[in-house]
Image: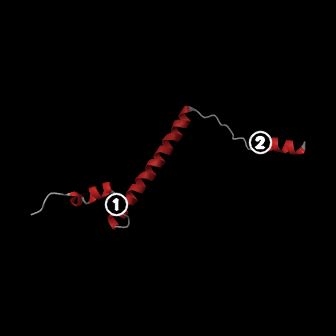
């Protein structure tokens, strides 16, 4: 009996706590999370641009086309 009581007690203690929140609270939380994600993406893009300008990372095709479009110029030069 002691083992069963311990297993039941542990299952009850590990149950996630449910907290009711209002729709407005959820939307405020969601806006905050979206803003944080947007800020992280902007910072990563800024750092990537700095690294490309410094030559620390390889560019993908799109970045190469944006930064050095002359590479894709196939017009004959006389």
- Identify the residue at horizontal 65%, vertical 37% (top origin): 19
Is 76 placed left or right of 33 in the picture? left
Which is closer to the viewer, label 1 or label 2?
1
If the image is split into quadrants, where does the C terminus sit? bottom left
Q: Which residue is identified by label 2?
A: 11
Circle 2 packing at 10 Å, graded few (<14), some (14-19), many (20+), is few
Badge 1 density bin: few <14, some 14–19, many ≥20, Cα 10 Å: some
What residue lies at 42% left-to-right and 56% top-to-bottom? 44
Expressed as whole percent of the image width and height from the top left, the position of residue 60 reads: 34, 58
First in sequence, mark 1 or 2: give its number: 2
Circle 1 SS class: loop
**What colouring method underlies this structural image?**
secondary structure
In the picture, the disc for residue 59 is 1
Nearer the observer, 45 or 36 = 45
Quarter assignment of residue 76: bottom left
Residue 11, position in %: x, y? 77, 42
Front-lying residue, 43 or 9: 9
Q: In this view, does 30 lie above or below 65?
A: above
Quadrant of image for the N terminus = top right
């Amino acid at each position: 009996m002691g083992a069963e009581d311990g297993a039941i007690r542990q299952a009850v203690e590990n149950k996630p706590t449910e907290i009711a929140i209002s729709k407005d609270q959820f939307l405020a939380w969601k806006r905050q999370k979206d803003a944080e994600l947007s800020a992280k993406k902007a910072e990563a893009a800024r750092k990537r641009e700095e690294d490309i300008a410094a030559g620390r990372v390889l560019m993908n095709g799109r970045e190469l086309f944006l930064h050095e479009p002359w590479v894709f110029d196939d017009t004959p030069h006389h």
